[in-house]
Image (cartoon, grey):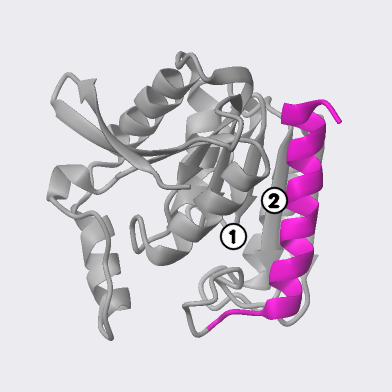
Amino acid sequence: MTSERIAVPTPDGELPVHLWRPADGSGPGILLLQEIFGISRYIVSRAQDLADLGYVVAAPEIYWRVGVERIEGGDALPRAFATVQRLDRDAAVGDAVTALDWLGGRAEVTGPVGIVGFCFGGGLGFNVAAVTEPDALVSYYGSSIPDLLPLADQVTAPSLHHFGLADSFIDAEKVAQVRATVSTGQDVEFETYEGADHAFDNPDFDYHHPEASALAWERTVAFLDRHLQGR
């Protein structure tokens, strides 16, 4: 299957959104929020994985306001950090909410709508879930969640959080703080992975941890089955 790139209107211009449909054309929706590298090859691969599981998947280009779709090459990480610094955080949250609402209104979305976010997108998804009401949230090592914990009480959707315990950017103390705060909510699952660094799910990044990636994905699929597929 191939994706379709669609321009979604916002008050400030057109937000590009990549849309994948499952083989039968319809199903529950998933807003897929990008890692720090944008709509990378890895994000495209995960979008296809989710579509293969029966979901209608929408991945908005959160960096569109600064003219970036994806960041690649040997110096990708410093350029990605620089790109994030140029973002208007409130506008990024608003764009993600716009994409979530747009996805939920599409005719091919015939069930609940959840959020799956990786790295930068894991924190963004948490923020979005605090200001709107998705049906589920899966956050992989949400890098900004430690700074967003004051919003935790506003996140009422069932949620699943994945963190590596060898994360180079979110130390074990911060992971424990996130766990203690978010776990006070209802229907929260919090999984940690010994020896796994940040971005452990991304096979295109140096920190990939195959065992943690496989286990986290298995848990993600089961969580989404329960909350979006009703299985």
Q: Dot 1, how many residues are within 10 Å of its Cα: few (below 14), some (14-19), or many (20+)?
A: many
x, y percentage for residue 39?
Answer: 35, 55
- Tell me which residue sits at (66%, 79%) in the image: 209
Please report whichever mark, 2 or 1, sits nearer to the chain's N-terminal start. Answer: 1
Disc 1: which residue: 141
Q: Does 184 sit above or below residue 195? A: above
The answer to whether residue 91 is left or right of residue 185 is left
Q: Does 13 sit above or below residue 196? A: above
- Residue 188's image quarter? top right
Q: Magenta stretch containing residue 162, yes or no? A: no
Amino acid, disc 2: His
Mainly helix, strand or loop, the magenta region?
helix
Q: Dot 2, how many residues are within 10 Å of its Cα: few (below 14), some (14-19), or many (20+)?
A: many
- Residue 28's image quarter? top right
Instruction: Say which mark, if any, is on residue 161.
Output: 2
Q: Look at the image and give the residue range highlighted in magenta.
A: 207-231
- Tell me which residue sits at (50%, 85%) in the image: 206
Is residue 230 at least partly visible in the picture?
A: yes
Residue 136 vs residue 86, the one in the foreground: 136
**Which element carries disc 2, helix, strand or loop?**
strand
- Tell me which residue sits at (46%, 50%) in the image: 121
Q: Magenta stretch containing residue 227, yes or no? A: yes
